[in-house]
Image: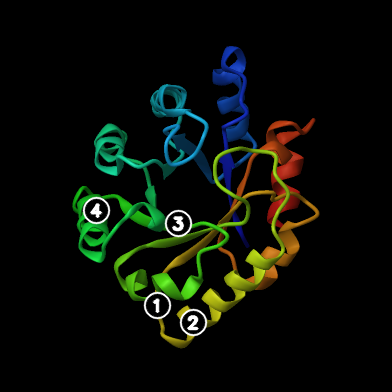
Amino acid sequence: MVEISTSILSVEEENSIKTFYNLETAKTDYFHIDVMDGKFVKNNTSNLMLKYAENIKQISNLPLDVHLMVKDVDNFIEQYIPLMPSFITVHYEVFENKEDLLKVINKIKQNGIKCGLSIKPNTKIEEIYEYLPYIHMCLIMTVEPGKGGQKLIPETIEKIDKLKKYITQNNIDIYIEADGGINLDTIEDLKQAGIDIAVVGNAIIKSDNFKNTIENLKK
């Protein structure tokens, strides 16, 4: 069964605490924290997402799934280490060389946090094969990172299928997560391709019943 990481990007601030509580009782598996810096992507959510993450840690035991869409990776890792998220995921495209990426991967792991590596839709999956043994999760962006509410790019499903076959053939123990445009209409193809975790935002947050929506997504 696929796990659900609910993106809280579109949660209204005035109702946020109640929404987080309702998501927990609806049995989301993770809270997905979309951290944007206004540089790597246009939007800047850094202050709000840190506030949300800190609030969640005070009221919930559910794990945080932190997705850093930022250029200054080190600074944001330092912000989130005290919150002990389950995952901190960085973008492959941010790094100019292999050494810098491996250094960041090790920093995350040395702090007892699982490391994820994300790629944009136009990045070939083969480019990150060499890093798979060092990380815990590969996050495939199924839309361009930076804003919610986009439609899933169908070609990204082929990328997930290719990744799943590669990690099976090479016996690599790693999660596959997909993020972007995922709803009740699109999730089945992603499950067939081999995802372990689906990041879902608007399809849950804007639904009338979180519990029913999450249950149906997991089926």
Which-is-in-front pick, marks 1 and 4? 4
Q: Which residue is mark 4?
A: 104
Neighbor class of circle 1 (other Cα within 10 Å; few <14, some 14-19, many 20+) is some
- What's under tag 2, amino acid-wise? Tyr
The CA distance from mark 2 to mark 4 is: 24 Å
Q: Which residue is mark 1?
A: 172
The CA distance from mark 3 to mark 2 is: 17 Å
Query: If the image is split into quadrants, where does the N terminus sit?
Result: bottom right
The CA distance from mark 2 to mark 1 is: 8 Å
Q: Which residue is mark 3?
A: 118
- State which tag comes first along the sequence, 3 or 2: 3
The CA distance from mark 1 to mark 4 is: 20 Å
Q: Is residue 195 left or right of residue 101?
A: right
Q: Position of residue 29 (x, y in %)?
A: 54, 46
- What's under tag 3, amino acid-wise? Ser
At x 64% / y 39%, what residue is drawn?
201
Q: Is residue 196 left or right of residue 209?
A: left
The CA distance from mark 4 to mark 3 is: 13 Å
- State which tag comes first along the sequence, 1 or 4: 4
At x 63% / y 49%, what residue is drawn?
180
- State which tag comes first along the sequence, 2 or 1: 2
- What's under tag 1, amino acid-wise? Ile
Neighbor class of circle 3 (other Cα within 10 Å; few <14, some 14-19, many 20+) is many
Query: If the image is split into quadrants, where does the C terminus sit?
Result: bottom right
Q: Which residue is mark 2?
A: 166
- State which tag comes first along the sequence, 2 or 4: 4
Q: Is residue 64 visible?
A: no
- State which tag comes first along the sequence, 4 or 3: 4
At x 34% / y 64%, what residue is drawn?
135
